[in-house]
Image: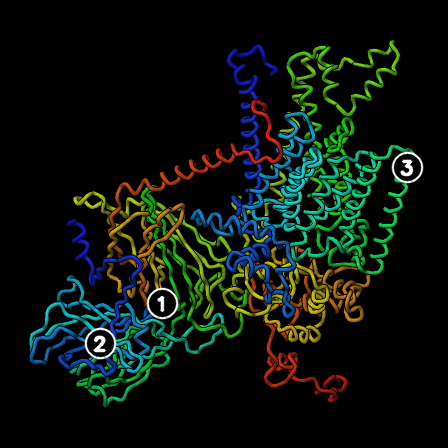
Amino acid sequence: MRSLISWAWLGLISSIATADSNLTHESRNILPSAFSPPKHFRNVNLVRNINLEKSYPRETINVVIENIDKAAQNEYYIPFEQGSLGQIGGLEVVDKKEAEKKGFKVDVVGIDPFSTTEYYKITLPTPIPPKDQLTLSITYFVLSALSPLPREILQTDKQYVLHKFSAYAPSAYTTVKQKTKLKLPTTDVPDAVTLPASLNAEKKEDPQKQGTSYTYGPYSDIEAGAVQEVSVRYEFTKPLTHSKLLERDIEVSHWGGNIATEERQWLTNRAATLKNHFNRVQYQQSSYYNPPTSALKEMRFPLVVGSVDAYFTDDIGNVSTSRFRTNKKEANLELKPRYPLFGGWNYSFKVGWNGDLQNFLRKVKGGNGETFVLKIPFFEGPKQAEGIEYERIVTRVILPEGATNVNFQTTLPLISNTTSLHRTFLDTLGRTALTLTAINIVDELRDRDLIVTYDYPSIAKFRKPLTITAGIFAVFVVAWVLGNLDVSIGRKQEKGKKA
Amino acid sequence: MAVDTAVPGADFFFKGESGRNTRGLLRLLILVTIAAAAIAARLFSVIRFESIIHEFDPWFNFRATKYLVNHGFYKFWDWFDDRTWHPLGRVTGGTLYPGLMVTSGVIYHLLRFLTLPVDIRNICVLLAPAFSGLTAWASYLLTSEMSDSPSAGLLAAVFMGITPGYISRSVAGSYDNEAIAIFLLVFTFFLWIKAVKQGSIMWGALCALFYGYMVSAWGGYVFITNLLPLHAFVLICMGRFSARLYVAFTTWYALGTLASMQIPFVGFLPIRNSDHMSALGVFGLMQLVGFAEYIRHQLPSKQFQTLLRAMVLVVFGLAFGGLVLLTVSGVVAPWSGRFYSLWDTGYAKIHIPIIASVSEHQPTAWPAFFFDLNMLIWLFPAGVYMCFRNLKDEQVFIVIYAVLASYFAGVMVRLMLTLTPIVCVAAAMALSQILDQFLVASQPSEPTESTKANGNANGNADIKDKLAAAIPESLRSTKAPLVGIYSYLSKSVITGAVTAYLLLFVLHCTWVTSNAYSSPSVVLASRLPDGSQHIIDDYREAYYWLRQNTKEDAKVMSWWDYGYQIGGMADRPTLVDNNTWNNTHIATVGKAMSSREEVSYPIMRQHEVDYVLVVFGGLLGYSGDDINKFLWMVRIAEGIWPDEVKERDFFTARGEYRVDDEATPTMRNSLMYKMSYYNYNSLFPAGQATDRVRGSKLPAQGPELSTLEEAFTSENWIIRIYKVKDLDNLGRSHQEAVGFEKGNKRKKAGKRRGPRTLRVD
């Protein structure tokens, strides 16, 4: 039990839930439409970093907050425009000074059709006394934020993407001093909106350029909710891979000592579409010197070491262009889609592999000896240098038949969890299946674990062999009875005479 | 039995009641092993490639099965498919044989009921091998009815299990009607023989039931519909009419015809189509003969008998005349074109090019018989001869079947399939006879020999007695000749030879299956220089591209060969497909392909075509491409529009079909030529472009397209997809628009330059 507890504290933000059968928990509460957060805080100093090196921006806001209320407060709000909230993912908040400690509880509030602004509510573990300060580090990703401009390019052209954002960090409170730093992947930046120097606190040129980093600000005394729209356009000749849905099944078999994983992906490339159609000649010629391209040509899945039997198929069968390298140190699955994915093209596929259950499952010491702990990655998916964003991930953990008392915990923000029964392979009751859904996830979070605990009585193991034995026995009995029935019409043959 | 002197304990296992059980168990084990071997032999393609549906027609069956599984039986029955034959659509539910799909659907739901999550694709892929195991069992049953030898049935089962003639249509992935139809064919014949032998209504009804199943599964049911009446007819003509035959035939005909009429695609054909009239005629004849027999039993007068016989003939003649009249007046449908092509192999080529264009409808080449049947082909006549030695009702059936099927197999490659079962049965009978003679270790003894001869042949027994009475005393030795093999040497030589032949047969079957019949044809395999296998997967690359990156209802125009594959893999509407029900529509596509762009474009616009797909093997040397099939498109189009498309125009003055510099202007301006070679030049250094299939150098100037634009070309250029351009925004013709884009000035008449003159400064 001790190990379980230590794992529980491992997470940054832990969401613990006891899953009842066939119940869906949605972790979103709805506030009255006229809601606006009380102005208990003031942002003393705010530095926002926007990292644009991948196909999705990662924003980190380091902010010193101060309680200006008379009472101690523990609820801090971050506003987002309606619509853009649906693109925000993986929002995590930690105390900057004690980053190793677990993160704070974060909720989305105010999904309301009439208000234009929605909020993330951060619940601080200990209320801040008046006049006291705290440094928060808020990290999140913005999905589908980059849009290629021009929208159509030639097959061998460079691609430029446009990122629109506000020079002022989103805040529900007055900010005394703030600036926004951009980290671009290249120095090829044709357009960056210049703000008048009068806005700048130091009356300097805005933005400040230094190599691949641009800085907007500093600005002083910005009101809550103020927006200053700016945009940058920069070269990004890489695919903007977007996964519309990732379904992931993990099947645990105690009998076979096996853990089978299958991932089904629906990918699309958000990059600029081809102005003329796809030209095979150009593509073949360019493949010799391999220039950067906005087409997705290859994907790499670094799997858990010890994974075996990998397969790569799609709706019409096996895709032969894959390689699976496996040795004692690594298990890499390298996939090539059937065709290179240019902008606007889609590709859906399925990959799967097996693993040794011993590496993932542990029996809990003490207790009644029938409690197990399963530790698996929440999702795996390809790991690309330019990144992949996931609109929705549905992970289903299929536990053995008869598993009860299922608990789980993960550090990824979930939107729903369900426990149901899944009947397969001669099941009588059906296996306990835990379905977890997360939205707006990026591939940087692919190492996050999912820990599932469940009770599996040893008697449940024998359910299936007994059922099958009984079934076969029943078939024999029925066959014997039928074989002894006399269904002949006409007069009965005399006994002793053989038919 | 033979080894009496062996282990004393062996008696328990080989004699009496438990001996029978032992033999039964052994037989069961052998049959199960045979079935396993039959299934294993068909798995080459799954092991070498993957679990995939093969070729063309199976893709439709697979798609239909998925529809059945997803939408239920009634929806399937009423299925109107608007994604094929655009814009006509196809009443699919009423124009297919549902047996195959329903079989897979039932298996699927059964497995689902047992909560076994087997993919419908795997059921479809493995259905044919599974049924081949059943076919082996069915031919065991059939042969066991024919021969007294215990080994004949098992040999027939082995032959049926691995003979390439049957494997060719039943490898894993070959999900076609024949997959289950051959089992049903053999099993129906077995039930028929059983019914005729026993005169049992139960067996007759079972025969009708399986006949109904067969009708629901394959158009080849007509073979049964004609063979059984023919058998009955021949038996009547031989004076072997009996109550058994009457019961068997009438039961089968009445129930079987009703069963067959339940299939929408067959409907009223059994009473309105010439193909089925022989069954009806024999049914009528059977009643007359039965009536006559009845009267004969009542009235012993000889004159009356002759009168009756005459009457029977008159009635039969009248019925036949009436049938001819009905056919002429059109009440009964005349023979179909496919039927005529069975009698005249040149018929299809002249009248129905679309039938002739399919390779499996060509007449069979002689080596094909040896290729598909190996040593069975020379055992086959021997087996048929054995039937004459002991000619009972069921042996007559073998003889008729053998004669008919041999003829049909000679006419069409495809009908080799119906010949194969009878070849296996006959060959097994011949071989079992040899083995039974030569494998007996003990010496034959004289008295048993004569009793054996009597016991063996009931039919011939009385003839033999008569013969014995007629032969004078001095020739007594001929009455009961001393026949037997006494020498162990000859026994071992013959046994050894037969064993060698059988082993060679297995070797041949495995080789043929592995090399000729196990390619999915959707996926091509080649060898890399280091000997490893390289998969060429262009078809699926392009089909999947279409599936993922085009509109859900984008219409794809291609030659009909690829219609089913596009429907199954790309899931896009097509204009024509392998169900060639509308010749005009196919000819329209042929015309669009073989005409100039100016002619083709309006045709494509009228049919709302979004994409055009062609198969081009020039880069890889893949010979099954569209340029090689092009002449059939031209011929089929010419059949409808003889004034606009002429086959002659595609040949050079010397009658050659060329694609290089000397190709005719019609050829070089045809849409197919342009689509095949568009942009192909730029892959090579200037003037070096070669077509590796035709082995010719292409013109230095590649073709230009104005109404289409290249949308996708697969990795090895096998599939090329073109998008049909929308109308020009400025109302120009596409040729003008393309010319403008290229910066060509309009050619203006006049303003001629004067003759060049030497400039003198």
Q: Which residue is mark 3?
A: B304
Q: Which residue is mark 2?
A: A78
Horizontal placement of B312 versus A137: left or right?
Answer: right
Q: Residues within 10 Å of mark 3 (few under 14, many from 20)?
A: few
- Disc 1 with disc 3 on a shared chain: no
Horizontal placement of B451 versus A290: left or right?
Answer: right
Identity, as a three-letter code, of the amino acid under mark 2: Ile
Q: Nearer the viewer, residue A335 or A32?
A: A32
Q: Residues within 10 Å of mark 1 (few under 14, many from 20)?
A: many
Task: Tell me, for residue A191, which label it has, or none.
Answer: none
Q: Chain of mark 2?
A: A
In the picture shown, does residue B734 fall above or below B298? Answer: below
Residue A492 pos. (x, y %): 59, 30
Q: Which residue is mark 1?
A: A391
Q: Nearer the viewer, residue B582 or A144?
A: B582
Residue A296 pos. (x, y %): 43, 64
Residue A279 pos. (x, y %): 54, 68
